[in-house]
Image: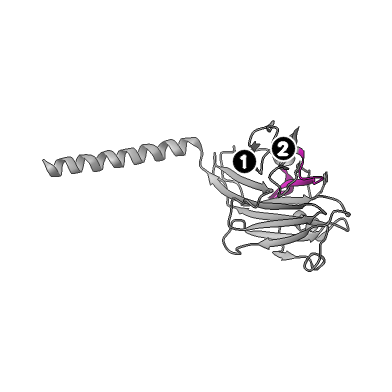
Amino acid sequence: MKVTMKFAGAVFSVSLALGLSQSAWSNITDVVDLGAGNLSFDYGSSGFGSLTAWYVLPSGTESSFGVAGASGLSFNAQVSPPLPLGPGGTAQLLVTFDLTNTKGSATQPMKFIAEVDPNGADDRLDTPASHMVIGAHEPDRFEIDNATPVPSLLDQNIVNGQLNNAIAPACQSQPCDVDFALQWNIPALQPGETSRVIVSLSDDGQHNSASFLSATHVLPDDEEILTFSGTAQVVPEPETWLLLGAGIGVMVLGYARRRERARG
C-alpha cells in the first residue's frame, strides 16, 4: 500500500488502499478500516492499491486529515457498502467525502482531488485508459502519470492544485506504473452547506459518472481492471431543505385552493 505525505503549507495524507479484479469471484475483499478514512483491502489474485483524497484550499493543499482539523470546516468519510463486507466482498466500492462549512460566512472556492495508485509496485505494470468527457464537469480535470520516479509530475500537480488533463508519454503506448487522479472544482460553500464527492472504484466496469479512468493489469490466467470515477455536488444545510419543502407545500396548497374557487 502506498501512503504519501506531501507538504505545501500544511499537507497531510489520507489513504484508502483498494483493489479490483474483473473476475466475479474475486471482488474487493478483506477491507480493513484503519481510521480517518484509511482503508486496506485485497483484490483479484494479488491486486492492491491506494486511494488518497486531497482538498486544495486557499491556505494550501490538505488531505482529509488536514481539513478534519481545520477551523470552520467539518469532515466526514463513509464507505458503501458498510464495513465489514460479507465473505464475497463487493464489485463496486463507493467512498463519500463530505466537507461542511460550519462558519458564519462563505468559504472560498476549493478543489477536491482523488488520487489512485493501482497495484503500487514497479513489477506490476498496468495499461491506463482515459474515458473523459471534457467540459462535462464530472469531474473537471484528470491526469495519468507514471508513479516513478518520485516525486512524479502528478505529485507536483496535486500540491499545486491543478491536474493537467493529459496522459504521461511513458504511459501512452505501453504499460507503466500507473498513478492517476480526478479533480473537481468546488464553488464557495455558504454557511451550513456541504461539498459531497462520491468516488467509485469498481472491478467490473461500473462507474457513477460519464467520465472515468481505468487501469488494466494482465495476468497469466486473469485480467484485473480498475475503474475509477466520481460525482460531486453541493448539499444545502438541513434548514434549507425544510424551508424549500415548506415553500413547495404552500405553492401546492395555493394552487389547489385556486382550482377549488374556479370550480365553485
Residue 262 position, x and y percent, is: 14, 44
Q: Main secondary structure of the magenta part?
A: strand
The residue labelled by disc 2 is 37
User: Is residue 6 shown above or below 257?
Assistant: below
Number of marks = 2
Whole-angstrom CA distance, mark 2 to mark 1, is 11 Å
Q: Is residue 57 highlighted in magenta?
A: yes
Considering the image in quadrants, where does the C terminus appear?
A: top left
Residue 76 position, x and y percent, is: 65, 36
Identify the amino acid type marked 1: Asp
Considering the image in quadrants, where does the N terminus appear?
A: top right
Marker disc for residue 18: none
The answer to whether 6 appears left or right of 252 in the picture is right
Name the image quarter holding residue 10.
Answer: top right
Residue 24 position, x and y percent, is: 68, 45
Q: Closer to the camera, 197 or 224?
A: 224
Residue 21 position, x and y percent, is: 73, 48
The residue labelled by disc 1 is 98
Q: Closer to the camera, 191 or 196?
A: 196
Name the image quarter holding residue 69.
Answer: top right
Q: Secondary structure at mark 2?
A: loop
Identify the amino acid type marked 2: Gly
The answer to whether 200 appears left or right of 261 in the picture is right
Residue farthest to the left? 264
Q: What residue lies at 80% left-to-right and 46% top-to-bottom? A: 47
Q: Which residues are magenta?
A: 40-63
User: Can you see residue 161?
Assistant: no
Q: What residue lies at 24% left-to-right and 43% top-to-bottom? A: 255
Q: Is residue 227 highlighted in magenta?
A: no
